[in-house]
Image (cartoon, grey):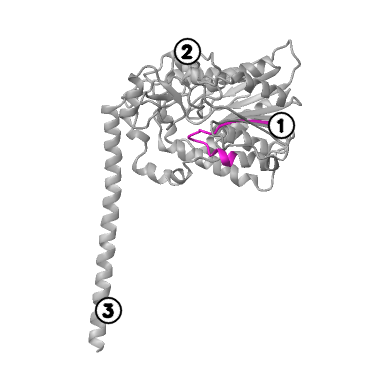
Amino acid sequence: MEYLRITMRASVQTTVIKLKIRATIKFLALVWLLVMQMACADSADDKTHTNTRTDSRIDARMKFPTPLADFDLYRENLRIYLLANRMRSRTPAEAMLNLPFELAANDEVVYRGKFLLFHGLNDSVYVWTDLAHALAQRGFDVRVVLLPGHGSHPKNMMQISYQEWLRAARVHHAFWDVDDTPMHLGGFSLGAVIATILALEHSDTAGMLLISPAYHSQLNSLLRWSWLYAYYKPWMFGGMILEDNPIKYNSIPINSGTQYFRTAQYLKGRWGKKKLAMPVLMVMTADDSVVDVDYARRLYRQKFTSQRNKLLLYSNDADVHVDAGQSRGKKEIIRPSNYPARRILNQSHLSLINAPDNPLFGARGSVLVCNGNEYPIFMACLRATGHWFGAQHTPSPDKTPVARTTYNPDFPYLLKLLEEVFL
């Protein structure tokens, strides 16, 4: 019996060792496979998409310029950086559309203070062009800053971290908030998350303008694990795709979504029992394909306490209504989202911030943003004429391709609310 016990123990130990060896071999093989697939993906990107590896304008030695107290010098550093790191598809003039800017308050009206504005994920300062000028005309000094990784080349988002975005935002705020002038904050999408983080850190913030605030994404269940997926597939759509938008990346590294998710999670961890008492104007569309609109509405009701607050929501859904009890006296306004005469089916995530006369995204704008993550749908949209316009995933009423709505026909009403909240 003792001999049998020893023999069985030796057999089990041998089996365990074999299993460990097999598991180690499989693990090493998996690592090798992942490395080879990423290398092949990079090679395929070079052959089948825009050739970014040999793009002489991508200077890996240049670091994204840090914020400076001297805003003009900061802009000059970024001008040099953006020209050196622009994509081949962008002309020097188009690269300059991504350059941070500031506007002086109209000296013919009452001075109102400062507005520091932050753009959204994968786009740039240009998104604030129309509202920045509207704010300056109404008595605000305005400064719009560029977040690290943006405005140049999508590959610069591959290694970016949300801590870099927050660090840059905090430094910009510190450099500009040097006296008793009222400091307001504004953010579009990701930028709204960053603006809210700063407001929690600065209780004297005078007001906030929040457009399509991405406090919580409808894609959170995927974004939560995107950091892991990025090791296997670092790009959405498999790599670089057609880049025809001069102020926003069409090609999206998975890491950019990961870092957005971590920014939003960071904010959630900062709330606790805190509330924000400054006046807030929040603008959203119920058809937003990015933002969890219900989550943002709950946050508006629970965390923003000023009686001057207003939430403007565009919706075609007759069931979307304002519960006066839940809103606790803070104004919520529902406006129609469709404009049949303009062939607009609904408002989109990016349309709310642009005026109808915007040269890139307005009614006669030069940039067409096509819906559809599938290549055939995307290309059908590019080749079509007589488009419908709507949010991402909006179905066509007659099989004519739906391009993204890129401007807000109701922009004058948005400006009216802006005056009611901040003036």
Give me the residue at 64% from left, 37% from top. Answer: 322
Identify the magenta region: 280-296
Distance from Cα at disc 3 to Cα at disc 2: 80 Å
How many numbered marks appear? 3
The amino acid sitting under disc 3 is Arg
The amino acid sitting under disc 2 is Arg
Secondary structure under tag 3 reads helix
Residue, disc 2: 364
Instruction: Specify the label residue 292 is tagged with.
Output: none
Q: Earlier in the sequence, mark 2 or mark 1?
A: 1
Count residues near mark 2 (Cα–Cα under 10 Å), then give few for <14, some for 14-19, many for 20+. Answer: few
Q: Nearer the viewer, residue 358 or 128?
A: 358
Give me the residue at 28% from left, 69% from top. Answer: 16
Distance from Cα at disc 2 to Cα at disc 1: 34 Å
Q: Nearer the viewer, residue 275 or 340?
A: 340
Give me the residue at 30% from left, 39% from top. Answer: 38
Circle 1/circle 3 CB separation < 8 Å:
no
Distance from Cα at disc 1 to Cα at disc 3: 74 Å
Residue, disc 1: 279
Q: Is residue 66 above or below residue 362?
A: below
